[in-house]
Each structure stands twice: as C-alpha cells, then as structure tokens.
Image (spheres, rainbow, N blue to C red):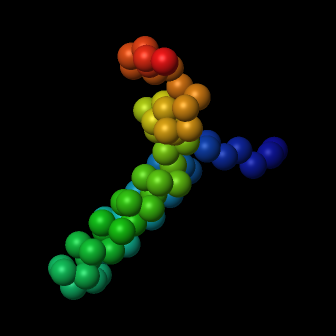
Amino acid sequence: MGLYIDYSIFIQFLQRVFSIDTIVKPLPPAMAYNVSRNLNFFTRIFTQFFDPEGIAGAQKSLGLGQEEKARRVR
C-alpha cells in the first residue's frame, strides 16, 4: 500500500498557513500594514509572468505584444 498525497489539498493548506495575513498577524498594526504592502508588491512582481494579464503587460513593455493602435511611420 503506497502513500497517496492529494496535492490540491496540500496546496490549499500551504496557502492558508503561509498567507500574508497569517504572517503579519502577530506584528503591531503599523508594521503589519507596511510588511503586508511590501509582500504584496513583491509577490505581484514575481508572479506576474504566470498571470495572463501580467504576461500581456510584459510583452507590451518589451514591444512583443500586439499594439493597441497602429504606429505612424514617416
């Protein structure tokens, strides 16, 4: 009999335990607010390439995405 791990339940558990709210809960309110803002900023930066909207934004900033309007070239 082998060990069976349901990864979706495991991932949900990790997301609950290591959420930003549970990490900043024991901190004083002012510090919790600043840490929460910083963590949200960094998680947004590092996970943007996994989000379709973030991928489109990165492609657009690099000039690889489809342009919203045609450029005028002289």
Q: Is residue 33 above or below residue 60?
A: below
Q: Could you tell me which residue is drawn at 43 percent across and 52 percent down?
A: 44
| Quadrant of the image occupied by residue 64 | top right
| Quadrant of the image occupied by residue 62 | top right
Q: Residue farthest to the left?
A: 29
Q: How many marks?
A: 0
Residue 38 screen position, x and y as percent: 36, 68
Q: Quadrant of the N terminus?
A: top right
Residue 43 appears in the rendering: yes
Q: Residue farthest to the bottom?
A: 28
Residue 14 screen position, x and y as percent: 50, 57
Q: Is residue 31 above or below residue 43?
A: below
Q: Nearer the viewer, residue 74 or 26?
A: 74
Q: Is residue 3 above or below residue 70?
A: below
Q: Could you tell me which residue is drawn at 23 percent across and 72 percent down?
A: 33
Q: Residue farthest to the front?
A: 74
Residue 45 screen position, x and y as percent: 47, 54
Q: Nearer the viewer, residue 30 or 74?
A: 74
Q: Nearer the viewer, residue 8 or 44?
A: 44
Q: Could you tell me which residue is drawn at 53 percent across and 25 percent down?
A: 65
Please give left or right for residue 68 compared with residue 29 in the image.
right
Please give left or right for residue 15 compared with residue 49 in the image.
left
Q: Residue farthest to the right?
A: 1
Residue 19 appears in the rendering: no
Q: Nearer the viewer, residue 35 or 64?
A: 64
